[in-house]
Amino acid sequence: MNFRRSDRPGDRAESERLLDATGAGATPAGAADPLAQLLSAAAAPPRPGELAGEQAALAAFRAARASGAVAPVAPPGRRRGLTTGVVAWIAGIAATATAGAAFAAVTLDRPAEPERPPRPSAPAPTTPDRSTPSSGGSTSGGSTSGAPSGAPSGTPGAVPSATTTAGGPAGGGKPDKPSKNGKLSGKCRAYLAKSPRNREKALRTPGFADLVAAAGGAERVEAYCRELLTEPAPAASSDPQAAPSSPAPTPDAKPSKKKK
Amino acid sequence: MTGELTEAVAAAQAGDEEAFRFLYRSLQPGLLRYLTALVGADAEDVASETWLQVSRDLPSFTGGEFRAWTVTIARNRAMDHLRRQRRRPSLPVPVQALSELAGDADTEERAGETIGTEAALALIATLPPREAEAVLLRAVIGLDAETAGRVLGRRPGAVRTAAHRGLRRLAGLLERRDISPASDGEPRPAPPRPRGGRQGSSGPRTEPADG
């Protein structure tokens, strides 16, 4: 009824439609397209010979029922259990690794501020006295905890992924007006944490411009910073000014560990 | 269909023999056709093994596509079988045989159809295994591309591509077959040589697709 045009499916979508129709038994038996005919022939209703094994299958079913409600654990089931175990393991390892990294970040941060209270989570409530520099901090979860090194170290317990926030809050770091000094000391820490080669580069970035300006020149930044950081910092509770500093060190968010 | 199957599976899991019979009748023809493409004449045996395992493991079936679950078992049994046999899954079907099949009793009893089930399956079995499997799982078993992909351990896109290629190849084969005279069941003159040669070269490199 048709001329010998090539009926081949032109694209994947057309093939899909044809296969879907056949799979659903929707192909009309008298379709003109030879390919559709072939598929529907392949998917034709059962022929008697094809069900010859029915009794054997039923016997197997009965035997399986009889031989055990204590059905042997099926291979698929076992495999599934294994998979679950593996997933659990990976999750556990991931959690441990992340927590470990967070811990490492804490440990690395701490020596920078030996004079600060070791558990900075505590200072958080004490800062409010005159602060609300934390208003700026609210943008970045880390900085709310007040103490300079507290921001990074206060969070990791709660958020294992806090390692990233050690540098992260810096990125969000809207400069807090009341803590110019603190901000600079934060930048200093970030600066000093860099390798000498990177230091030069960092000072050319806008994020460090004010540090350079405050130091009075790029070549004096290091000295300036050492001085700034070694001058005895008042306790966090009494001087919230220094408080939000550390979260804001690197607006360009370069380093993830900021000290040393 | 799927809803019925799901109910039947639950009933069979509870021990309902009639439900199991329903499952068998629903799935066996497609399984057998699929297995024939994989293991040729041993399909019956592999199908029996499949139902044995289905019976045994039915309690552990936790839901999902029962057809896919069963086909996966069947496929694994077929691969085991092939490994045991260490031989090619299906014999290349010479194009003459196909043409004759198309004209045999199967066709006659379905007057008006140009191709019978047997011949159609034989033709599909000449496809490269990936394509043959994709076409059979989609068209004969009735799985969608995603489910077929799970059975085959391949991405749905790969299944779609393989199926499409298979269909194109089939269309080409049909066209060639069409050109020759007489698909009416008459004894035919020997087919021209070149076609046989071409068929041979593009013919089945049948091997378990999953290696």
Image (cartoon, rainbow, N blue to C red):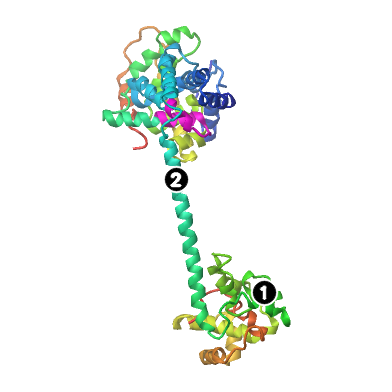
Q: Chain of mark 2?
A: A
Query: Which of A240 and B102 lies nearest the eye of the viewer?
Result: A240
**SS majority, magenta:** helix
Q: Position of residue B149 (x, y in %)?
A: 47, 37
Query: Which of A126 and B172 lies nearest the eye of the viewer?
Result: A126
**Image position of A214 with respect to A86: above or below:** below
Mark 1 and mark 2: Cα distance apart in space: 43 Å
Q: Position of residue B188 (x, y in %)?
A: 35, 10
Q: Residues within 10 Å of mark 1 (few under 14, many from 20)?
A: many
B86 left or right of A165? Answer: left
Q: Residues within 10 Å of mark 2 (few under 14, many from 20)?
A: few
Residue at 56% from the left image edge and 74% from the top image edge: A153
A135 left or right of A64? Answer: right
Magenta segment, which residues? B54-74
Mark 1, secondary structure of its residue: helix
Q: Are marks 1 and 2 on the same chain?
A: yes
> Looking at the image, can residue A203 be seen?
no
Q: Which residue is mark 1?
A: A137
Q: Amino acid at mark 1?
A: Gly
Q: Which residue is mark 2?
A: A83
Query: Which of B108 and B149 lies nearest the eye of the viewer?
Result: B149
